[in-house]
Image: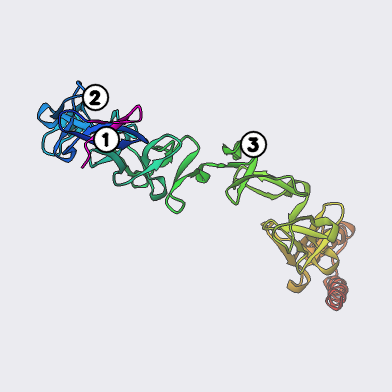
């Protein structure tokens, strides 16, 4: 082999056992046996064994390891001095960085792929907890763990307790609005708020105003219900309220209901009342309408009365005695008088039964 190089268009021999090597299209002299550690010394005319001086061969020259690096006698390369503490060669090969701090493995002395449960973030240029698998940083920020195991959600790559108004949702595996205590999602605020405080119900996990016709908020049930105070009851469609009196209905168990047997609609009272025209009046307990006629009573002052005939007899007797107090009572005549009264009451009762 011709051990020389071109200089000023003339061939010159390389000194001291060097050979010709073409680098970047420039003809320079380089040491033979580079694969055995030989390289050009600081004196360009001398080849030496770089490895024996804890140096590497770089661009045909003996080069000392840079700051933070040491020479690996076994591999004959420069490696990070603190590799045992987690430091590896960065993308810039002249620098060492803390791989472990960035949750990277050290592969071939270089910072490489992320360790288990981590994933590379191009935005932050480091490994972060793999949120796609439910991992977030623990409170001490030293490791990743599954946040849901502690009823926590992932916020900024960290496991975080649920905030006020939120509670852990096992089904959604995240913190959701605490609906049990009245919190629902507010679309405008993009946050959970207490719906009940502002007289709103929770519908489909959201705060919902009771502004539909006939509705009002019930603090008892924490729901939108029909405004019974103003005469609204539940329609056949349970999602709607209607003004019951428009259909001559009253509110029974929160629903619009037609008058039952024995009742009739009263426009004055806006409700169903006992139908006295058919013999019904309120019973003594004021709980329901009683059929007076069926029980053989008549209606007196809106009540069933069983004593009307007796009262007439008593009154008649008093009158008779007062009139005839100075004369001898003709009991035979008196009994005939009583018989007439009874017959008159009987005819009246029969008339009631035919109605």
Q: Is residue 269 above or below residue 84?
A: below
Q: Residues within 10 Å of mark 1 (few under 14, many from 20)?
A: some
Badge 2 is on which residue? 66
- State whether residue 68 appears in this view: yes
The structure residue drawn at horizontal position 17% and vertical position 37%, both measured from the top left corner, is 32
Can you say which quadrant of the picture contains the C terminus?
bottom right
The total number of labels drawn is 3
Q: Quadrant of residue 142?
A: top left
**Does the magenta-highlighted stretch encompass residue 331?**
no
Magenta stretch: dominant secondary structure: strand
**Does the magenta-highlighted stretch encompass residue 6?**
yes
Q: Position of residue 170 (x, y in %)?
A: 42, 51
Among numbered discs 1 and 2, the one appearing first in the sequence: 2
Name the foreground residue: 50 vs 303.
50
Answer whether labels 1 and 3 touch (C-beta < 8 Å).
Answer: no
Among numbered discs 3 and 2, the one appearing first in the sequence: 2
Answer with left or right where residue 68 lies relative to residue 204. left
Q: Residue furthest right?
A: 323
Badge 1 is on which residue? 100
Badge 3 is on which residue? 198
């Amino acid at each position: 082999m011709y051990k020389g190089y071109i200089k000023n268009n003339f061939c010159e021999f390389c000194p001291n056992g060097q050979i010709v090597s073409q680098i970047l299209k420039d003809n320079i002299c380089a040491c033979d046996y580079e694969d055995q550690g030989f390289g050009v010394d600081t004196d360009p005319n001398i080849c030496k064994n770089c490895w024996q001086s804890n140096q590497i061969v770089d661009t045909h020259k003996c080069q000392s390891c840079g700051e933070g690096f040491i020479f690996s006698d076994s591999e004959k390369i420069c490696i990070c001095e603190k590799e045992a503490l987690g430091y590896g060669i960065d993308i810039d090969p002249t620098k060492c960085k803390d791989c472990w701090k960035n949750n990277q493995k050290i592969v071939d002395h270089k910072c490489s792929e992320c360790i288990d449960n981590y994933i590379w973030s191009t935005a932050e240029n480091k490994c972060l907890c793999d949120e796609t698998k439910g991992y977030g940083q623990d409170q001490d920020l030293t490791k990743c763990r599954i946040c849901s195991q502690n009823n926590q959600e992932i916020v900024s790559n960290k496991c975080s307790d649920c905030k006020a108004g939120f509670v852990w949702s096992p089904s959604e595996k995240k913190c959701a609005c605490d609906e049990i205590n009245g919190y629902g999602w507010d679309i405008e605020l993009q946050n959970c708020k207490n719906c009940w405080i502002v007289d709103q119900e929770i519908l489909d996990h959201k705060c919902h105003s009771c502004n539909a016709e006939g509705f009002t908020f019930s603090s008892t049930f924490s729901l939108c219900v029909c405004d019974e105070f103003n005469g609204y009851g539940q329609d056949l469609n349970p999602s709607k309220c209607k003004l019951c009196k428009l259909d001559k209905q009253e509110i029974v168990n929160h629903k619009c209901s037609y008058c039952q047997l024995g009742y009739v609609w009263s426009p004055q009272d806006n409700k169903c009342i006992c139908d006295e025209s058919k013999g019904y009046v309120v019973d003594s307990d004021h709980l329901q309408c009683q059929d007076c006629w069926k029980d053989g009573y008549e209606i007196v002052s809106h009540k069933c009365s069983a004593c009307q005939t007796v009262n007439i007899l008593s009154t008649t007797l008093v009158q008779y005695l007062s009139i005839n107090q100075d004369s001898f009572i003709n009991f035979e005549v008196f009994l005939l008088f009583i018989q007439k009264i009874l017959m008159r009451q009987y005819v009246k009762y029969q008339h009631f039964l035919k109605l």
